Image (spheres, rainbow, N blue to C red):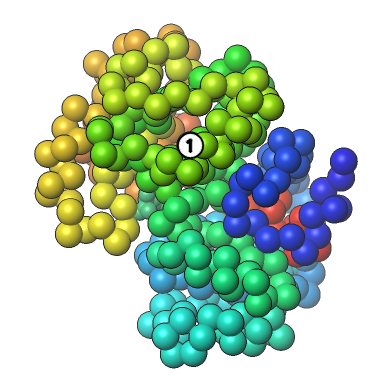
Amino acid sequence: MSLKNLKGKNFINLEDFTSDEIEELIELGIKLKKKTQNNKDLNLLKGKNLVMYFAKPSLRTRLSFEIGAKKLGASAYVIKQDEIILGKRESIEDTARVISKYADGITIRTFAHSDVELFAKYSSIPVVNALTDLSHPCQIMADLMTIKEKFKTFKGLKLAYIGDGNNVTNSLLKGCALVGMDIATGTPAGYEPNSNQIEIAKKIAQKTNSKVEIFESPYEAVKDASVIYGDVWTSMGQEAEAEQRKAIFTGYQINENLTKDANKDHIVLHCLPAHKGEEISYDTFEKNQEHIFNQAENRMYAQMAILATIMA
Ligand code: CP
Ligand code: NVA
């Protein structure tokens, strides 16, 4: 198997990739990190152009893609929602066909996952999902890279996701299953991950001999976990529900009391931005800050691996 086969492919859904491909991309991310840190020239995408569309705010995704693309020798151009309003000023189909004439790749952060799928149908350049309401695959590639750096393997490890069953959770379920790591979620009733995504993850887990477990109790979920993972209780686009969500998620804070039941050598990860004092306590965040900011750093290398592979 070689990553060469992935040239031109979209990076929209993790399940479109095999376990071997995901593991090879993670290894490439680790290699590119070492090379970058040793100031090696990485002209893998010299002369290429990446367009990045954002319908939602971003710190990490924007900068890690933009700077990562530049480190690979490519140029990156950001378009914000107010400039083109994807699907409103003109159709998504036409926008895709125009951007395909100028650029060599595009990242899209938006609301409806189906908009990214539609764009990809009409695009002749690879499309990368930079977060939709359904999933956030690039985040999970960085998360898996961080876990691999720390534990050297995925086998025998369990990740516990605590909080809102959201886009990050959906991608984590599939990502963990693909690399053969057990995953358990602890989410309040009515806030479980997307049921379709759970089914996809369970099917993958059967092949990789790993477990996908959905609990209401955060304590059940964290038992024997090596990685505990948190994300905001209110995702972008759900701001009107913020107060109601705070009340519902009260028992789901990742803190020293909850993490007692995890493995002794566990780490806590958070995709950021963090709302300390809500989904994670100040103490637990600071105790794990080295891992959490390494995870943020790895966004750049994991995405450089993706871009270098599909835009080559
Ligand atoms: N984790 C993440 O995607 O961060 P941004 O929303 O800042 O890009
Ligand atoms: N679930 C969060 C992730 C932010 C990176 C959101 O969609 O806002």
Residue depicted at 61% across the width and 61% down the height:
128
When asked about the image quadrant of residue 23, the answer is: top right
When asked about the image quadrant of residue 34, the answer is: top right
Estimate the x, y position of residue 271 in percent, counting from the top left.
43, 43
Looking at the image, which is closer to me, 190 or 32? 190
Residue depicted at 76% across the width and 36% down the height:
20
Element under disc 1: helix
Disc 1 Cβ-to-ligand 2 distance below 8 Å: no
Residue depicted at 59% across the width and 43% down the height:
141
Q: Is residue 147 above or below residue 56?
A: above
The reply, left or right, for residue 230 in relation to residue 87 is left
Estimate the x, y position of residue 199 in percent, counting from the top left.
52, 37
Count every numbered label the image shows and give the total.
Answer: 1
Label 1 sits on what residue type?
A: Ile
Q: Split into 4 quadrants, where in the image is the N terminus?
A: top right
Looking at the image, which is closer to me, 247 or 79? 247
Q: Is residue 238 above or below residue 142?
A: below
Note whether residue 141 is visible. yes
When asked about the image quadrant of residue 155, the answer is: top right
The reply, left or right, for residue 92 in relation to residue 32 is left
Q: Split into 4 quadrants, where in the image is the C terminus?
A: bottom right
Alpha-carbon neighbours of circle 1 within 10 Å: few (<14), some, or many (≥20)?
Answer: many
Note whether residue 277 is visible. no
Estimate the x, y position of residue 176 in percent, counting from the top left.
57, 31
Residue with the mark numbered 1: 198
The reply, left or right, for residue 86 in relation to residue 42 is left
Residue depicted at 42% across the width and 48% down the height:
167
Q: Is residue 303 above or below residue 140?
A: below
Looking at the image, which is closer to me, 98 or 256? 98
Estimate the x, y position of residue 192 in percent, counting from the top left.
34, 37
